[in-house]
Amino acid sequence: MSAVQVVPVILSGGSGTRLWPLSRELFPKQLLPLTAEQTMLQQTVQRLIGLPSIKAPVVVCNNEHRFMVAEQLRQIDVDPAAILLEPVARNTAPAVAVAALAMDRVRNLSPGSDPLLLVLPADHVVAQPEALHAAIAEAVPAALDGYLVTFGIEPHWAETGYGYIRAGKKLADTPGVFAVEQFVEKPDSETAQSYLDAGGYFWNSGMFLFSARSFLAELGRHQPQMLEACTAAYQGAEDDLDFVRLERKHFAASPSDSIDYAVMEPTAKAAVVPLDAGWSDVGNWSALYEVNDQDEERNVCRGDVVAIDTSDSYVYAGHRLVATLGVNNFVVVETADAVLVAPRDRVQEVKQVVNQLKRERRQETSLHREVYRPWGSCDSIGAGERYQVKRLIIRPGGSQSLQMHHHRAEHWVVVHGTAEVTCEDEVFTLSENQSTYIPVGSRHRIHNPGSIPLEMIEIQTGSHISEDDIVHLEDEYGETK
């Protein structure tokens, strides 16, 4: 495998609504540390360490997540070959298509080469990376021969939440690799049990290995409109800081479809490698419970939790003490602005809660109380009629946009660090315990010139306290909020 060039393609565009209220549209599960100190995205990238000939990854993500993705990669010293920004969600097939087209951005590829793309969702758990490495090595010869290889998870129970792959005959000269006989939709419990009893069926993991040219050729054969739209979107892309911003009109014109439906099911070149590596897609709270270590009462507790006469439960305390009494087989999740309580056997239905909140236009579906920005973060710690109080953290060297408000004034107090404040034509410095007032209609900006995070309290007062009362005058990050 040493002469093979493998480019990881990390798909980080999901919203993870079934893990609400922890996962939200603008801070989804792949950017959260759900099973370890590192986030799911960071774990996905780091489990590739040790693979021979591995190249810098190409990451495909939502435009709204771009700075969090870049920062999380920086934290683990990973310099991606490209971060491709999807202007709209179009499922996994278009995401992989633009990544395959972006091989001209991958460093140190041999000229004219056709690298293998290792496609990995950013929000999966793989407990035994060495088993994944072995499966990848086994898949390489078939991928070099033009097969589109998927990794089928060996089932250990009759799961109804996954699609299945039925393996056919072994491929010639590729031990351990099988032709795909059939892709099967999520079964009912009786059918799932029959698959388990029969053998030869595997959970569909959504992980793939194939060459860039092979994938694009099969996409063009079965979904020519998608390939045309993605090619135009990539050719019209613009570089923006460390990102590649895909052209919106053409990408939005692409059909929205998964790799399975667009390519893997219709192609005659689908193959599968069985994989037993402690895999989970962490698709809901019960799945997250299963992949975490449990105590003697079979509970998973995170944060400040007191669990009395409680068993078989997942309890998460994000911001305050959570106490349970006489609870069995439940999920309890507390965040700063929402609490979920549900039986573990009904967590597949959490999306109903999210849909209800969306109908009511509640921001809790998309935002946490603490919101991350490219310059730092802001936490809305209090609000009432005609006022709102926020805690701002400005990273070293970070700046908010130069902006103004038509309906609100702001009072700023420095808690820790040094602030360089622009207010109209005046620029001045504030230190710890110092404050200033920004009148309605004044052009203003906060900049952190120091080497430590700047912590401030912002008090907004006025007739209209809303994010839509921001006029961006100058903005180095291209923010919309």
Image (cartoon, rainbow, N blue to C red):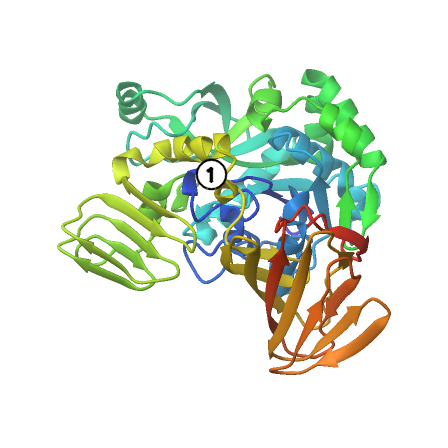
Residue at 74 percent of width and 23 percent of height: 253
Residue in front for this viewpoint, 441 or 123:
441
Q: Residue 139, position in %: x, y?
A: 55, 38
Q: Quadrant of residue 247?
A: top right
Total residue callouts: 1
Q: Position of residue 97 (x, y in %)?
A: 70, 32
Picture residue at 63% right of the left edge, 80% below the top: 417
Residue 392 placement (x, y as % from top left) = 60, 66
Residue occupying the point 79% across, 68% down: 423
**Residue drawn at the location 38% of the way across and 46% of the way down:** 278
Decide: few, some or many residues near mark 1? Use Cα within 10 Å; few <14, some 14-19, many ≥20: many
In this rendering, is residue 436 above or below 337? Answer: below
Res. 233 image quadrant: top right
Q: Residue 314 or 84: which is nearer the viewer? A: 314
Q: Is 445 on the left or on the right of 12, as rendered? A: right
Q: Give coordinates of residue 339: x percent, y percent.
A: 36, 48
Query: Can residue 106 be seen at all in this image of the molecule?
Result: no
Residue in the foreground of this view, choosing between 394 and 223: 394
| Relative to 123, residue 174 above or below | above
Q: Secondary structure at mark 1?
A: helix
Q: Which residue is mark 1?
A: 17
Q: Horizontally, is 338 left or right of 427 in the view? A: left
Q: Judge whether 221 appears above or below 455 on screen.
A: above
Q: Is residue 407 visible?
A: yes
User: Which amino acid, mark 1?
Assistant: Thr
Snapshot quadrant of residue 52:
bottom right
